[in-house]
Image (tube, rainbow, N blue to C red):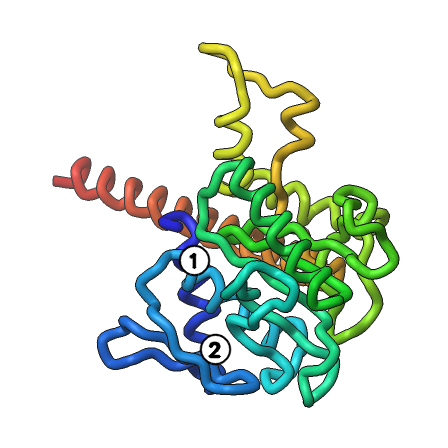
C-alpha cells in the first residue's frame, strides 16, 4: 500500500471532488454515493483499493454511479457472502454486468488465486458477464459469459470494457512503450526481485517472468499514458539541460571572481 498510496489517494480525491465519494470529518468512514448511499469503515487497507477503483469505474470507464452497488448479497452462496462491487446494465439493478473483488496491496499469489475463486463464485451466482480481482493496482479481469465455470485461462482479458463497450483482448492490445515503462515500475521490479535467484548477478527464469502481474488498461488508455510519460521525460531532459547550463555558467562566474581578486 505504501508504494501505491498516491494512486489510491488521487483517485479518492477525484471521486470526492465529483461528489461520488465522501469521508467523515475524521476520515474514519467513507460513503459511496452509488445506487444507494453506502457507508463503511475507511480504516481497512482494502477499502482504499475499493474506493480508488470505484472512482475509476465512474470517471475513467464511464459507468453510471446509479448502476453500481456496494456489498451486494450473493444468492446461492454461503450466508452473508457479499460482492465488493457490482456494476449493472440497467437502472433497476436486475442485470449484473461486472463483479469486483477487492483486496489490499501486497497479498501473496495464493491469496490472489483465492480471491479469483471468490470473484468467480460471486459472478457465476449473480450471472454477471465479467469479473475482476483488484489487489492494490494489480488487476486480473475475466470474461465470464460463454465460458465454462471452471475456465481460468482462456477467458482472461486485458481489462473491462469501457461503458458496456467492446470486450478488450490481450492479443494486439499492448502498447510497447507502455509495457516498457510499466515493467520498470516499482510494482513490477519488486515482483521480479522476489522471484529472482543468484547473488551478485540475480536472474529470473522465463517461467517466473510469465507470472509477473502487469496492470494492462485498454489500449486507448495505454496510448495516453505512454504519450504522457514521453512528454514528461522530454520536459525533464530539457530542464536538466537548462540546469547544467546554469551550473556551468555559475562555475565560470566563480572562477572569474577568484582569479580577479
Q: In this view of the protein, which residue sits in the foreground, 40 or 175? A: 40
Crowd class of label 2 (few under 14; some 14 to 19; many from 20; radius 10 Å): many
Dot 1: element: helix
Label 2 vs 1, first from the N-terminus: 2
Residue placed at 54% from the left, 65% from the top? 82
Can see residue 18?
A: no
In the image, farthest residue toward the right:
146
Residue 153 percent location from the top left of the image = 78, 42
- Count the marks: 2
Residue located beneath label 1 in the image: 46
Residue placed at 65% from the left, 64% from the top? 76
Q: In this view of the protein, which residue sits in the foreground, 168 or 184? A: 168
On residue 15, which mark appears? 2
Residue 187 percent location from the top left of the image = 51, 42
CA–CA distance in space, label 2 to label 1: 17 Å
Judge whether 46 appears above or below 18 on screen: above
Res. 74 image quadrant? bottom right
Residue 12 percent location from the top left of the image = 44, 71
Left or right of 126, for residue 256: left
Dot 2: element: helix
- Disc 2 versus disc 1: nearer the observer: 1
Amino acid at each position: 500500500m505504501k508504494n501505491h498510496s498516491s494512486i489510491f489517494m488521487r483517485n479518492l480525491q477525484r471521486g470526492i471532488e465529483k461528489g461520488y465519494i465522501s469521508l467523515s470529518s475524521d476520515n474514519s468512514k467513507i460513503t459511496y454515493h452509488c445506487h444507494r448511499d453506502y457507508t463503511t469503515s475507511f480504516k481497512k487497507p482494502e477499502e482504499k483499493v475499493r474506493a480508488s477503483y470505484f472512482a475509476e469505474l465512474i470517471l475513467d470507464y464511464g459507468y453510471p454511479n446509479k448502476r453500481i452497488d456496494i456489498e451486494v448479497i450473493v444468492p446461492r452462496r454461503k450466508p452473508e457472502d457479499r460482492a465488493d462491487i457490482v456494476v449493472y446494465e440497467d437502472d433497476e439493478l436486475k442485470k449484473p454486468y461486472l463483479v469486483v473483488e477487492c483486496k489490499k496491496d501486497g497479498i501473496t499469489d495464493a491469496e490472489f488465486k483465492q480471491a479469483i475463486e471468490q470473484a468467480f463464485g460471486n459472478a457465476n451466482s449473480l450471472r454477471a458477464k465479467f469479473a475482476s480481482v483488484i489487489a492494490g493496482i494489480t488487476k486480473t479481469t475475466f470474461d465470464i459469459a460463454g465460458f465454462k465455470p471452471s475456465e481460468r485461462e482462456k477467458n482472461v482479458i486485458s481489462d473491462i470494457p469501457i461503458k458496456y463497450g467492446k470486450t478488450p483482448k490481450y492479443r494486439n492490445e499492448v502498447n510497447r512503450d507502455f509495457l516498457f515503462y510499466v515493467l520498470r515500475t516499482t510494482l513490477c521490479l519488486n515482483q521480479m526481485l522476489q522471484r529472482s535467484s543468484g547473488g551478485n548477478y540475480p536472474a529470473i527464469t522465463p517461467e517466473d517472468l510469465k507470472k509477473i502481474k502487469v496492470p494492462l488498461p485498454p489500449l486507448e488508455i495505454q496510448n495516453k499514458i505512454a504519450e504522457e510519460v514521453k512528454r514528461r521525460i522530454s520536459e525533464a531532459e530539457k530542464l536538466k539541460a537548462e540546469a547544467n547550463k546554469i551550473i556551468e555558467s555559475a562555475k565560470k562566474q566563480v572562477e572569474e571572481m577568484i582569479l580577479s581578486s
